[in-house]
Image (tube, grey):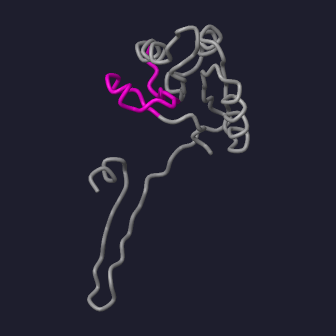
Amino acid sequence: MATLQRNGGYFAPENALGKGTTVLIELPSVVMHGADHQVVLLDDDMLVHMNWKLAAKAAGVGLKAYKTPKDFAAGIETLPKDTPVYIDSDLGSDIKGEDIAKDLHEKGFTDITMATGHAPEKFAHLPWLKVAGKEPPWS
């Protein structure tokens, strides 16, 4: 319940003798970044790109997807620091997404997620880094 309240939610159980219990739960709304706000993906897998692009289109989300760290670095220069960024851990050629995530964090980016098949424990040393699976967050 404390987590719910810390995140702007509300929980109120009411007991009525002989009538049972009623529970009121209010959850904070989630702002989904739409086409007017970019979401960025860095992954070297073409199938991941196809899946994310289809899901983004269906959800009305603006997605910029990059296959190489070089293209990614050039593409994010003008984006706001609160832009949601999703990065795969294994980018080929011994390039690690967590190294790119560290660089972004040092540059002031605040919404970075490792979109990977690895367990979250692998990234526990980066407490600011969110960890999710490879599925788009809108599917």
- Give 21 or 54, whichever is nearer the viewer: 54
Quarter-of-image position of residue 56: top right
- Residue 26 is left or right of residue 46, and the answer is left
- Residue 92 is left or right of residue 57, and the answer is left
Residue at 64% x, 19% y: name it. Answer: 44
Residue at 68% x, 33% y: name it. Answer: 62
- Give 115 or 21, whichever is nearer the viewer: 115
Residue extent of the magenta highlight: 107-131
Relative image position of residue 37 (x, y in whole percent)? 62, 32
How would you classify the magenta stretch by its main secondary structure?
Answer: loop
Residue 104 vertical position relative to residue 23 in the rendered view, above or below: above
- Give 84 or 136, whichever is nearer the viewer: 136
Residue lying farthest bottom? 18
Quarter-of-image position of residue 55: top right
- Residue 107 is left or right of residue 7, and the answer is right
Relative image position of residue 23 (x, y in whole percent)? 36, 72
Say whether residue 16 is magenta: no
Residue at 53% x, 44% y: name it. Answer: 31
Residue 28 vertical position relative to residue 109 in the rendered view, above or below: below
Residue 47 vertical position relative to residue 71 in the rendered view, above or below: below
Residue 71 vertical position relative to residue 29 in the rendered view, above or below: above
- Give 15 or 41, whichever is nearer the viewer: 41
